[in-house]
Image (spheres, helix red, strand yellow):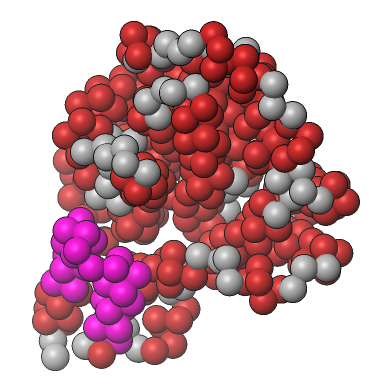
């Protein structure tokens, strides 16, 4: 086959995979692996190239964090924190929504946002049931907070893991550049949702009293394991801060912590490994191969040339364009495959011009992570949360979510536009 044929085939496979992911009628891991297989069968990539395109640093980091969280979950620590938050808020619904949102955002900065949602939603459903409140406002606010908080760090959101792994940007660089704007946005959004739903955030005093009498100490199931887990988790977080200076990849730091915790916990490793989200990992692997395929045929280079011509190589126009395109695209397309496709494009833009592409990474990160809040399919955390809500008889439709959350997402991107211009362009 000619180079043109390979070029066209790679686009067909890529677009087909994206279309099926958006359609959401098939398992996205199967779709991604099918696309990766076609890239090899059509000889767009040979087998060695396909395996070389997989980012093992990203996969290693995800596996390690899943192991650590699976072990911590056994201690009851997350349930304990949920009860403490209720008591701090004095069971006042308005205050409770704000505190749960901010707590979710902070958790999401140091765990991945899907894991955070899986941990926080059972707490929300339990507390709102006890207080006879509609859980939907709390779920929506927490989903938004999980994506916002995850934007602040290297490990908080899969798009950031991808960007950090490909560029070498460290945990501290993400925290300093993204965190400085994300945490104010997290607090702002929590108050916006609390104000938006203020009329429904009302409960009876007798119900408040009942919930406040709950003993949070009873939530802890294994104090010894909790202490071990907190020590290891704390050391891993310190390692994330220092990994750039130490010369180790973030995955090495996390995997070291996971192995140590497995060893000292005494838990059967097979039980822990069963809780790893293997489907997510295979989805990533397939995606890496697909993006490698379109990169090898020159599709990414062609798009980079188009963007440079369209913006005239102007840093301001390019950064703003990437921010908004990333946000709007990520609202309707899962932000993981979108970012995976954008990374080599930005690299090529830097190779073909004198443009300083560092601000473009922050524009991509902020746009993709915050833009994922726009619809219920924009980010994995959104899909997981709305699925859990529906299983508990609280269906959140695409239209309702869009009407409620999309304007708030646009506000955060508008603020980020000002931030990008002031911090990196002027």
Name the residue rendered at 15%, 78% in the picture: 9
Question: Magenta span covers which residues?
Answer: 12-40
Q: State the predominant SS element of the stretch in magenta.
A: helix
From the viewer's perspective, is residue 237 above or below residue 130? below
On whether residue 161 falls in the magenta region, the answer is: no
Image spot of residue 150 (x, y percent):
51, 39
- 329 sits left or right of 93 in the view: left
Name the residue rendered at 39%, 89% in the picture: 47
- 313 sits left or right of 108 in the view: left
Image spot of residue 48 (x, y percent):
44, 87
**In this orientation, does residue 176 appear?**
no
Image quarter in which the C terminus is found = top left
Quadrant hosting residue 251: bottom right
Residue in front for this viewpoint, 55 or 156: 156
Image spot of residue 37 (x, y percent):
30, 84
Quadrant hosting residue 348: bottom left
Residue in front for this viewpoint, 294 or 214: 214
Image quarter in which the N terminus is found = bottom left
- 116 sits left or right of 257 in the view: left
From the viewer's perspective, is residue 109 above or below residue 388? above
Image spot of residue 214 (x, y percent):
69, 27
């Amino acid at each position: 086959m000619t180079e043109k044929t390979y070029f066209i085939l790679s686009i067909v496979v890529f677009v087909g995979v994206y279309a099926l992911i958006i359609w959401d009628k098939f398992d996205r891991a199967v779709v991604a692996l099918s696309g990766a297989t076609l890239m090899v069968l059509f000889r767009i990539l040979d087998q060695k190239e396909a395996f070389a395109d997989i980012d093992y640093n990203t996969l290693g980091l995800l596996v390690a964090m899943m192991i650590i969280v699976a072990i911590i979950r056994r201690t009851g620590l997350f349930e304990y924190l949920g009860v403490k938050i209720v008591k701090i808020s004095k069971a006042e619904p308005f205050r409770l929504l704000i505190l749960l949102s901010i707590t979710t955002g902070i958790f999401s900065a140091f765990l991945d946002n899907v894991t955070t949602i899986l941990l926080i939603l059972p707490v929300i459903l339990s507390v709102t049931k006890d207080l006879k409140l509609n859980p939907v406002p709390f779920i929506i606010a927490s989903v938004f907070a999980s994506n916002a908080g995850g934007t602040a760090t290297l490990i908080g959101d899969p798009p950031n893991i991808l960007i950090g792994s490909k560029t070498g940007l460290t945990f501290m660089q993400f925290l300093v550049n993204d965190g400085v704007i994300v945490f104010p946005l997290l607090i702002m959004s929590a108050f916006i949702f609390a104000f938006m739903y203020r009329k429904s955030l009302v409960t009876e005093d007798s119900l408040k009293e009942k919930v406040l009498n709950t003993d949070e100490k009873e939530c802890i199931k294994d104090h010894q394991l909790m202490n071990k887990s907190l020590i290891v988790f704390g050391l891993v977080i310190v390692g994330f801060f220092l990994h750039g200076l130490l010369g180790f990849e973030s995955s090495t730091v996390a995997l070291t912590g996971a192995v140590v915790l497995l060893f000292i916990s005494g838990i059967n490793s097979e039980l822990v490994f069963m809780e790893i989200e293997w489907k997510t990992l295979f989805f990533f692997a397939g995606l890496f191969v697909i993006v490698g395929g379109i990169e090898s045929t020159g599709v990414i280079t062609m798009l980079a040339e188009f963007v440079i011509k369209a913006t005239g190589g102007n840093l301001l126009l390019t950064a703003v364009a990437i921010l908004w395109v990333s946000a709007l695209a990520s609202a309707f397309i899962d932000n993981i495959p979108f970012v995976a496709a954008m990374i080599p494009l930005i690299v090529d833009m830097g190779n073909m011009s004198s443009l300083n592409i560092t601000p473009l990474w922050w524009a991509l990160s902020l746009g993709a992570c915050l833009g994922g809040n726009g619809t219920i399919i924009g980010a994995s955390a959104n899909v997981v949360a709305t699925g859990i809500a529906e299983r508990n008889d609280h269906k959140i439709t695409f239209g309702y979510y869009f009407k409620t959350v999309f304007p708030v997402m646009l506000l955060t991107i508008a603020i980020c536009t000002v931030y990008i211009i002031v911090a990196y362009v002027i």
